[in-house]
Image (tube, helix red, strand yellow):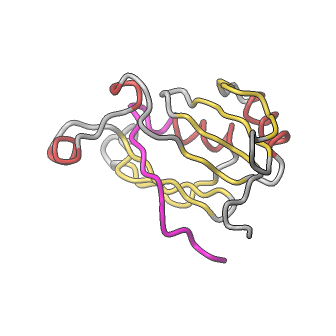
Amino acid sequence: MTKSRLIPCLRYEDAPAAIAFLCDAFGFARHAVYADPDDPSIIHHAQLTLDGGMVMLGSARSGEAAELYRWKTAREAGGITMCVSAYVADPDAHHARAKAAGAEILTEPRDNPGYPGRGYDARDPEGNVWNFGSYDPWAG
């Protein structure tokens, strides 16, 4: 399996809830989750996988790293500055799963305008936008 060399990294106010949501609604699997041994509500680092892709995430916390990188959650920023796009073989089935799990659906599954494939957009509980679609940018 080819491993992606670009891995989106996100911060969440409630990282344990975000992990549960991303797994339940979007079909991610826990690859590694490192919770604070004294406070399991703090996730130092997590890796979630989806069909060979990965996102990493952690708890939003104040401190040196937050100041150095100017980390903000989508909610703190008042909107998104990027979205995560993921290839899925069947966007309609993926959409049904996400919707059943309570994901906020921004756009229903539709054919992509002007390029191949089909997809939909959803927002997670902390405001990040996710695009799931059948367009494979690596296919010729």
How many numbered callouts? 0
Residue 64 in the image, given as x and y percentages of width and height? 14, 46
Counting from the top left corner in percent of width and height, residue 9 is at 42, 51
Image quadrant in which the C terminus is located: bottom right
Question: In front here: 23 or 137?
Answer: 137
Q: Residue at x 34, y 27 (%)?
A: 77
Residue 61 in the figure: left or right of residue 26: left
Q: Is residue 15 magenta?
A: yes
- Against 14, residue 40 (above or below) is below
Compared to residue 138, the image places residue 34 above or below, namely above
Image coords of residue 136 (percent x, y): 72, 59
Relative to 74, 65 lies left or right: left
Is residue 53 shown left or right of residue 35? right
**Residue 62, quarter of the rendered image:** top left
Please tell me whether residue 126 is drawn above or below residue 4 in the rendered image.
Answer: above
Residue at 46 percent of width and 53 percent of height:
8
Position of the N terminus by quadrant: bottom right
Question: Based on the displayed image, in which of its 4 quarters is residue 24 positioned?
Answer: top right
Q: Is residue 23 left or right of residue 66?
A: right
| Residue closest to the eye, 94 or 41 | 94
Q: Provide the residue span drawn in magenta.
A: 1-17
- Quick one: which residue is furthest to the front in this view? 114
